[in-house]
Image (cartoon, grey):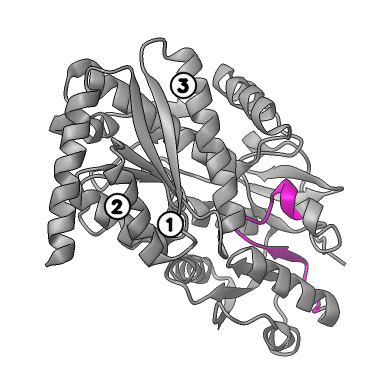
Amino acid sequence: MKRTYTRIAMAALVASAWMTQASADEFLVGAEIPLTGNLARVGAGMQEGIMVAAEVFNKTNGKHTIKIITVDDESAPAKAIAAVEKLASQGVVAITGGYGSNNISPASDTANKLGLVYITSGGVDDSLVASGRKNFFRINNTAGYEKAMLGLLQDVGAKSVSIVYSTKDATTGLAKDVEKALAAKGVKVTTHSFDPAITDFKPIINKIKLQDKSEVVAMVGYENDYVGIIRAARVLKPKIKAMVGVWSLATPKMAADFPDLMPNVFGTALLPFPTEFKTADGKAFSDAYKQLYKKEPDYLGQFGYVQSMLLFEAIARAADKGTLKKGGVADEMRKTDRETLIGRVQFAANGDNQNFVHRMAQHQDKKVVIVWPKEHATGKLAYPALPW
């Protein structure tokens, strides 16, 4: 009951802040991000994109400006709820950020109860868009990752695949979808689930080596999982042709941190490394990113940038129409139809981006090369090719 009263008070505070800010030039936007804990690395990447979006928006909008208030959710669901409540108490008009479906779900629930729009690119669990949250928006999804992984496996002609996946909700959902789609195409599929807490993957790799004898190991997990799986494979050397993963794998940081493990490994990525941008929006993002962080942008920053820029533009349109305190931000988000750095974004009634399709990249000579689909390829696919 005490928590209910607190949320009612916060909702009143949010409405008051909107009434104050509707005629102001600057709008406060909350960033709920994991900057510590096991998701700190990916959270920091998204945060960089968020800050670059604010920088570019503030220089180009001409009328409204955005100020970001960031709260670390410490990679924990309870802390994510507290972060959103704290941001609401500080008068933000919307929330950008969130990483990990387990954290995003309770955080976006809280934002929804407070009447705040919540947008993310950090969670692909489909339950996020099936729970009836009217203020929730997402620019990527499992279907887009599945299409990319399946497209690559089809192009290389894989006849058998061993899927190794974490038992977290999002990874389990993607693994099951990929398994079903591969089986429907006549590919021999075996699956191996693992608890997120384990670090020794040699028993699983040994089964793949001795029993599965698959051509490809498909990994559906997170950074530390990939490192453990590839290390085990380097030791046991199963007779496979490739190792393929999904998010947070084909990044320049993974190449720099694990130069012995990454060569020839595939993963989803929207950006090659070194980066290449041909559009005005892409060049604005890249230039601002390099100016702020003195390094090349990566895909996490790109996702953070796109989700935040769409949100800022919706806030500006709602402010111009005087609808900020009448659900105007959510209304403007639903009207979004825009070409972005990740492709065309349109939100379905459940808040999901119905056009999202990822790309596949490969670590080659300390570079990240886009190899699928062919129309976006920046280099030639190497196959068979292993990290040893």
Establish if 67 lies above or below 243.
above
Q: Is residue 159 visible?
A: no
Magenta span has 1?
no
**Residue in front for this viewpoint, 34 or 298:** 34
Judging from the image, what secondary structure is the residue with disc 3 in? helix
| Relative horizontal placement of residue 69, taking residue 133 as reference (left or right) | right
**Residue in front for this viewpoint, 151 or 266:** 266
Taking the spot 71% from the left edge, 74% from the top edge, the residue there is 228
Query: Percent position (x, y) of residue 352?
Result: 33, 46
Q: Earlier in the sequence, mark 2 or mark 1?
A: 2
The Cα atoms of the two marked residues, 2 and 1, are separated by: 23 Å
The Cα atoms of the two marked residues, 3 and 1, are separated by: 27 Å
Judging from the image, what secondary structure is the residue with disc 1 in? loop
Q: Can you identify the residue that label 1 sits on?
A: 124
Q: Earlier in the sequence, mark 3 or mark 1?
A: 3
The residue range painted magenta reads 238-254
The residue under label 1 is which amino acid type?
Answer: Val
**Residue in front for this viewpoint, 56 or 65:** 65
Tag in front: 3 or 1: 3
> Residue pushed farthest top?
62
Q: Can you identify the residue that label 2 sits on?
A: 85
